[in-house]
Image (cartoon, grey):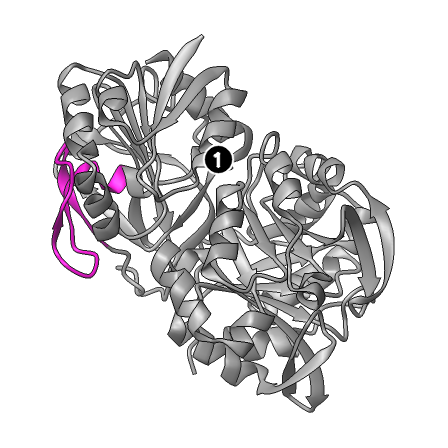
């Protein structure tokens, strides 16, 4: 059985994430203990809420250090929604806040008028179809290897991550002309802006793939 | 006047499950409740049919000042993997926190938000605007005028629906669950004018609720009312149709919905 450690820092839908991972066959440990995170086989960093609060909570408990230590050892890491955004260098939500710095780039607000001039509702809530990025010719050997390009997944967020390196960008969605980063992956570090635990069978397929990393 | 258009957005198809005690129930104008069955069984069936989201509403909670949904939500979260919005009787940040811990993704608040609007900001600040759904029970009181009701459509608030929604959004509400008490359970279509009056005034997503008889009603409230999502209950509970059939019919009518 595959062991997964879910980081509990007081924010996020821990119960839903646990249920989905267990449904995929994982043995789940939800913890706020830095030592357990540092020595985990696999780490999921969930998250719903504000970037600054999230980082403060991670740092207050030494969880940021534990996650970085695990990363150095090559432990597979999946960030979901806010958890994905915190993998980046910084966010400009409310104020400039440093993130975990595992994926180069930053987090900015979704513009309420897209580049093509369409007024877009914020938060971005709903199911959107994943599109492959130009830098990635195929989703084979990525976290999306069992996902079809016509599959839709569930998003709910007001901010979006922008990776500096195109090579980290695996998939995105088109929100009224604004291109939103949906999935980033650098080696064993994966981030999903959407909620795989809330995206039905397609989301579960993504989680199952993470369990194989 | 704000005209929001998002041609790429998918309209969300939402199953609304009203709960009394341990039972899924259905009323007419939020009254005359009939027991339908076990909530989890219906939730699972709608999930398997491909529903986009679920709404659970404890429809007697406000009367007794408590919400009994925690157990139902916890058990649904074990085999249903789509977003769940939970409402009814949520009176404090603690109530909201408890439900979110049980697997809820958003909380829908009506009565307590009207009595204590700062609760909207408290929930939004703690969990984000996207988590704070303002539930509105609207009754038409004149041409183009609706009043917000509390306690599952029983008590008047004196608040104009459009003005109240605008205020709630400014306080942090990230989504509106807009129920027409007049149309609820009637199967004769949504109150399109109500939905349009709200969608034209706020920039957050609006869920139209109350009155879905056929897919034609859905098409109308999306095309003419600019609804971002459609809640349905009666049409599913009484097995007059399935989410899958509604989805296919919506696609055929040119409505943008998730294809699978």
Image side of residue A213 versus residue B154, left or right:
left
Query: Vertical placement of B74 versus B168: above or below?
Result: above
Q: Is residue A54 above or below residue B226?
A: above
Q: Which residue is mark 1?
A: A15
Where is residue A164 drawn, in percent x and y?
12, 39
Residue under the image location 44 percent in, 80 percent down? B167
User: Residue A185 or A118: which is nearer the viewer?
Assistant: A185
Which residue in the rendered view is the most extreme toward the top?
A: A1
Residue B121 at x, y percent in the picture: 39, 68
- The reply to whether residue B201 is visible in this rendering is no
Q: Is residue A89 magenta?
A: yes
Q: Quadrant of the N terminus of chain B?
A: bottom left
Q: Residues within 10 Å of mark 1 (few under 14, many from 20)?
A: some
Q: Residue at x 35, y 64 (%)?
A: A118
Q: Residue at x 64, y 59 (%)?
A: B66
Q: How many marks?
A: 1
Could you tell me residue B235's position as x and y percent? 79, 52
Which residue occupies the foreground of this view, A187 or B171?
Answer: B171
Protein chain holding label 1:
A
Is residue B170 rendered to the left or right of residue A152? left
Q: Which residue occupies 17% across, 34% down?
A: A62
Q: Is residue B203 magenta?
A: no
Using residue B153 as the reference point, say whether residue B127 is left or right of it: left
| Residue B172 position within the rendered picture, expressed as x and y whole percent measured from the top left | 39, 68
Which region of the structure is painted magenta?
A84-108
Residue B140, by quadrant, is bottom right
Task: Find numbered disc 1 in the image and state the secondary structure of the residue it sits on.
Answer: helix
| Residue B79 in which image quadrant | top right
Q: Is residue A90 visible?
A: yes
Look at the image and tell me in which quarter the C terminus of chain B lies: top right
Q: Is residue B121 or residue B169 the one in the foreground?
A: B121
């Amino acid at each position: 059985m595959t062991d997964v450690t879910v980081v509990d820092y007081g924010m996020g839908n821990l119960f839903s994430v646990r249920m989905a991972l267990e449904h995929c066959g994982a043995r789940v440990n939800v913890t706020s203990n830095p030592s357990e995170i540092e020595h985990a086989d696999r780490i999921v960093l969930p998250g719903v809420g504000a970037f600054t609060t999230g980082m403060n909570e991670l740092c207050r408990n030494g969880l940021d250090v534990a996650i970085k230590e695990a990363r150095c050892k090559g432990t597979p890491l999946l960030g979901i929604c806010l958890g994905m955004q915190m993998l980046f260098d910084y966010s400009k939500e409310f104020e400039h806040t440093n993130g975990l710095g595992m994926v180069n780039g930053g987090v900015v607000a979704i513009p309420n008028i897209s580049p093509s001039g369409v007024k877009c509702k914020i938060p971005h809530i709903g199911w959107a179809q994943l599109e492959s990025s130009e830098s990635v010719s195929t989703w084979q050997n990525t976290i999306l290897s069992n996902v079809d390009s016509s599959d839709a997944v569930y998003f709910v967020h007001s901010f979006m991550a922008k990776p500096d390196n195109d090579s980290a960008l695996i998939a995105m969605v088109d929100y009224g002309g604004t291109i939103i980063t949906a999935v980033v992956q650098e080696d064993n570090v994966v981030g999903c802006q959407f909620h795989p635990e809330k995206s039905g069978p397609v989301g579960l397929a993504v989680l199952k793939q993470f369990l194989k990393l | 006047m704000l005209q929001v258009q998002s041609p790429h957005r998918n309209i969300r198809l939402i199953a609304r499950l009203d709960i009394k005690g341990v039972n899924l129930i259905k009323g007419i104008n939020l009254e005359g409740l009939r027991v339908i069955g076990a909530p989890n069984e219906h939730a699972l069936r709608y999930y398997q049919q491909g529903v986009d989201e679920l709404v659970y509403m404890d429809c007697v909670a406000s009367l007794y000042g408590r919400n009994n949904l925690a157990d139902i939500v916890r058990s649904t979260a074990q085999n249903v993997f789509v977003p769940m919005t939970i409402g009814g009787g949520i009176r404090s940040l603690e109530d909201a926190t408890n439900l979110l811990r049980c697997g809820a993704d958003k909380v829908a608040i009506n009565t307590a938000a009207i009595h204590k609007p700062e609760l909207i900001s408290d929930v939004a600040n703690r969990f984000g605007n996207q988590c704070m759904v303002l539930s509105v029970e609207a009754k038409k009181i004149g041409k183009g005028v609706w009043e917000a009701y509390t306690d599952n459509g029983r008590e008047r608030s004196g608040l104009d629906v459009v003005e109240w929604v605008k205020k709630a959004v400014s306080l942090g509400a990230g989504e509106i669950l807009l129920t027409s008490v007049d149309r609820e359970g009637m199967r004769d279509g949504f109150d399109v004018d109500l939905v349009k009056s709200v969608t034209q005034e706020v920039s957050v997503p609006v869920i139209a609720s109350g009155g879905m008889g056929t897919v034609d009603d859905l098409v109308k409230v999306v095309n003419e009312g600019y609804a971002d999502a459609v809640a349905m209950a009666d049409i599913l509970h009484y097995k007059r149709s399935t989410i899958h059939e509604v989805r296919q019919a919506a696609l055929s009518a040119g409505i943008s919905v998730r294809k699978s």
